Image: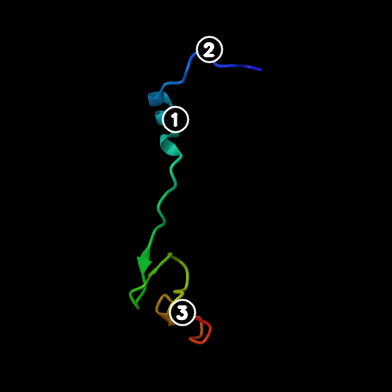
Amino acid sequence: MAVPKKKTSKSRKGMRRSHDKVAAPNVIYCECGEPTLPHRACAVCGTYKGRQVVSSDDA
């Protein structure tokens, strides 16, 4: 099995891992003021693009 000949430095290890971070989710605010994910109906009031798409008893 192949084994590295030299130790990988902390700097090189950090540079390699610099792109592995998790991106923060994009958040928009509904008309009711609650933060939601884009292109999804609001979980609190059930509206999407100004229309009521989920009935209030389900939400």
What's under tag 2, amino acid-wise?
A: Lys
Circle 1 crowding by C-alpha within 10 Å: few under 14, some 14–19, many from 20: few
Q: Which mark is residue 16?
A: 1
The furthest residue to the right: 1
Q: Which mark is residue 5?
A: 2
The residue shown at (40%, 29%) is 15
* Label 2 environment density (alpha carbons within 10 Å; few <14, some 14–19, many ≥20): few
Q: Can you tell which of label 1 and label 3 is closer to the viewer? A: 1
Above or below, 42 against 11 in this view is below
The residues bearing labels 2 and 1 have C-alpha atoms spaced at a distance of 18 Å
Find residue 34 and report its horizontal and vertical position in percent: 36, 72
Q: Which residue is mark 3?
A: 46
Q: Earlier in the sequence, mark 2 or mark 1?
A: 2
Q: Which mark is residue 59?
A: none
Question: Residue 53's spot in the image, x, y percent?
Answer: 49, 80
* Residue at (44, 30) in percent of width and height: 16
Q: How is the image coloured?
A: rainbow
Please state, as top left, top right, bottom left or bottom right, where the N terminus lies in the image. top right
Q: Please name whichever residue, 53 or 11, is drawn nearer the observer in this view of the structure.
A: 11
Residue at mark 3 to residue at mark 2: CA–CA distance: 59 Å
* Quadrant of res 9: top left
Could you say whether the residue bearing mark 2 is in a helix, strand or loop? loop
